[in-house]
Image: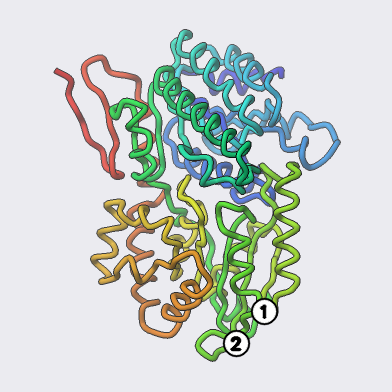
Amino acid sequence: MKIKTEYNQKFNHEETVAVISLYPKKGEVYSVGASGVASYTKNVVSKLKHPVLVLADIWQQATSSKKQTDNEQQYQEDNSLVLRVWQRGQAAMWLQILKVLTQFNQIKTLLIHFDFSMYDGIFTSALILPFLAITRILGFKQVVVCHHVIKDVQKLSGQVGLGQGFKDTIKAFIYNLIFKCFYWLLGKVAAKVVVLEEPLKQRLVEIIPEHKISVIPHAVDTQLEKSTKKEARQRLGYRQDESVVMFFGYVNWFKGADFFAQAVKDINKLNGKKTRFVMAGGESPTLKNKHYYQQFFQQVVSTVNQGQSLELTGYVPQEKIADYFAAADLVVFPYREFMCASGVMSLVFSYQKPFIISDHLNSMLKAPDLSQALQETELQSMDLRFLMNKRSLLEVMEKVLQNGIKAKMRKMAGIIRAQRSFAATTDNYEFVLQPARPTSQVSIDEGKLAYEVEK
């Protein structure tokens, strides 16, 4: 890619941060069909005080055969220059990124967002290790944001297409060894590893030196437009006198989309009141081309079609997000495994909505700020938690919908909303992105800045 001269002159400076990530469409934050990593990255980029060079994925590959124009390949948004230079699933993407970085030879700080699906496959994803080794030799400081931390693949069998047979058990064992080796090598070649919740750090400290790991809690977008409940329900065609229970996000196995659909398909009332169950989301953009995922998705669609008061919306465009959250009385998180911080949970805090979680997410509530918010609002973790069976889910949903606990939940969400705003969280990113200091090491833990002076 030939970079426009004015862009090179404006962004080729030592204070510029180069960001590698999936990225939403121009002018959008929550683009239809984009990974949650994309919206998270843009929210962080928009708040950074540094000028930012974003090395992003090529959207046209997935959405059209039309060749990109120069304005779609490279454009400026506020303090950032976006260059769409790589395609998912192509091993050469890391070379393409290096080639662009050589045209910005003054930049020495990299912020790289990572999970094993966003680059489409383990092999392409694993090539981040030699990329990090090369950039380290070239003098870059690399901060890697791990959106997922995986230690036991067997717990994610349906998400990665593994069965329960002997051969798949052996495969899972091999995958676990590969992941452990990957994280060990990541700790060797990266300057800093960032995770988005405290429990994810605890999984890594057995493999990566603790001083190399920073916890920056998943931020909350406080600038989202809001709708009134009445207006939102009118636009969506929902009745004003019904309860609305929502599962929001891409239809994934680890998120328990199939469990939710199966559990509520025969239910049309909670507490004797007509209830609508909404699955607001569509296919996973990072998995939709995999055969095992297509089978899973069609199974969920089939279950939804059998439901009495259950609907699947498909992708929710950015302008409709506010309506779905405003219309909902309760948001449900039936996750089978806590492998990543939840972007949907951050939206719950943004819109200050009551929510309940599966017991597999309980460790998330032990984060210092969440634990403190529970205490301040006189909530117990059991008020928010259900077991992964139909009876428990229905009991907890009815409990939340029938009494005054919803007000406490809204208050709790408001507390976290203020503490985890992107503006506040990005200050932590500014800190870890500072040039390395020979006499001190920096750690960010529990969402707060701490300084440890080496002796």
Instruction: Locate residue 34, reporting x and y percent.
Output: 65, 46
Q: Is residue 217 above or below residue 299?
A: above
Left or right, residue 364 beside residue 331: left
Q: Which mark is residue 274?
A: 2
Does the image show residue 302?
yes
Specify the amino acid type for callout 1.
Ser
Q: In the image shown, does 185 or 323 lie closer to the viewer?
A: 185
Does the image show residue 431?
no
- Determine the residue positioned at 69% across, 71% down: 311
Dot 2 alpha-carbon crowd within 10 angstroms: few under 14, some 14 to 19, many 20 or more = some
Instruction: Locate residue 169, reporting x and y percent.
Output: 57, 38
- Determine the residue positioned at 67% across, 30% down: 84
Q: Which mark is residue 309?
A: 1
Instruction: Locate residue 447, reporting x and y percent.
Output: 31, 44
Task: Answer whether labels 1 and 2 touch (C-beta < 8 Å).
Answer: yes
Q: Secondary structure at mark 2?
A: strand
- Determine the residue positioned at 37% across, 57% down: 362
Instruction: Locate residue 249, reporting x and y percent.
Output: 60, 57
Q: How is the image coloured?
A: rainbow
Mark-to-mark CA distance, 1 and 2: 9 Å
Classify residue 200 by image quadrant: top left
- Determine the residue positioned at 60% across, 78% down: 231
- Work out which quarter of the rendered image holds the C terminus and state it: top left
Dot 1 alpha-carbon crowd within 10 angstroms: few under 14, some 14 to 19, many 20 or more = some
Left or right, residue 137 beside residue 252: left
Left or right, residue 226 beside residue 190: right
Classify residue 413 by image quadrant: bottom left
Q: Secondary structure at mark 1?
A: loop
